[in-house]
Amino acid sequence: MSRPTRWRRARALPLATLTAIAIATMLMLSVGLAYIGVTWYSAYLEESINRSLPPEAALAYTRVYEGLLPDEAGLKTLIDHLETASAEADLKVQIATLAYSLLSAVVSAIIGVYLARRIARPLEDLTAAADVLGSGDFSARVAASAGSTREVESLVRTFNTLAANLERMETRLRFNNMAVAHELRTPLTVLQGGLQGILDGVFPMDRRMLADLLLQVEGLGRIVEDLRTLSLAIGQQLVMQRQRLDAAGVVAAVLSAAQPMLEAEGLTVETDLQPAPVSADPSRLRQAVLALVDNARRYAAGGGWLRVETAPLPDGGVVIRLLDRGPGFPEDMDAVAINPFWRGDASRSRATGGTGLGLSVVQAIAVAHCGDLTLANRPEGGAVVAIRLRPA
């Protein structure tokens, strides 16, 4: 955050404070204008009355003003003239007071309307941007104007953050829809072609043909199940039953069950499973570990080595780490963790049997356990994948 931005936010006043200042300013301005106007007009009337005095009354007035004793006739003339003029002057002062009060009220109202419109202008911009956002254009943004109140600046920032999140979600949704269609198209095409060939008598309906078709059905089932898992994660219903368990025991059980397929791929497994107690959903934790092990089997088997570690964290969480000697991850690491259906090599798409949703599922499970998924390349070659689970 730049220094001018921090200064502008620091000096932004709350709306209630700014409103109170504006009201107090308008009141003082109104009273001040009326006072100045009436005072000036009273002085003007006094000067006019003095100029209209008869000579003998003017002389008596001058002698009184200088502290001298006027003559009796002049003083009587002065008093009679002042009594006559004062009644008319009082009426003029009352009319002037009303006129200047109305004038000051009009001036204050004009200034108040200007200030109110200045305060409300960002809200009008927000309303217009919200209408654009409601029409489906998530690129709408509102520029924070100088002098806005603290609440308006906060509202503008929140709106822009919301719009940016919606724009990212729309981009991901569009990508996911295309990816789902792409992933489903191939197995469905194979199934349709195979079944049509059997019906037309082109392919024999033997066990081998049925096994191939069943393999495509199983692939579709994995895609549907992974999509269901991601949908549960979006609805915050992925982790339903937490219980106290040892993550090292869960990892050991998964490795034991996966040992035959790892050996078939020529992977030698090393372990360093330190006790790692944590509150977690055991089925989801097994699903995440199995997905990472299966991912290593598919893409890192060429390295011939896999190391699995568990360890407790100082904050009461645990970390599960897998290291391999495979090809590692590409330079654009964001695309790996964020985009579903990502595969490190397009040529290894369905030949390895993966759906491309594995890392997204693991990430969703980690986030549901208040943790995260981190991906990195090892300096000596290969990749390291770590799941961190933290206390709820």
Image: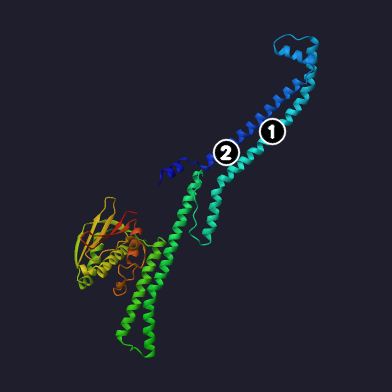
**Which quadrant is home to the C terminus?**
bottom left
The three-letter amino acid code for the residue at tag 2 is Ala
- The percent position of residue 22, horizontal first and vertical second, equals 57, 38
Q: Quadrant of residue 181?
A: bottom left
The circle drawn on residue 69 is none
Q: Mark 2: which secondary structure?
A: helix
Q: Is residue 227 above or below residue 210?
A: above
> Which residue is found at the position 34% from the left and 60% from the top?
334
Q: Kindly give the residue lying farthest to the bottom in the view shown.
A: 201
Circle number at residue 22: 2
Vertical placement of residue 258 versus 278, above or below: below
Q: Nearer the viewer, residue 290 or 343?
A: 343
Side of 118 relative to 351 (left or right): right
What crowding class fits label 1: few (fewer than 14 Cα within 10 Å), some (14-19), or many (20 or more)?
many
| Numbered badge on residue 100 | 1
Q: Estimate the x, y position of residue 157 in percent, counting from the top left.
A: 46, 50
Which amino acid type is marked by label 1?
Tyr
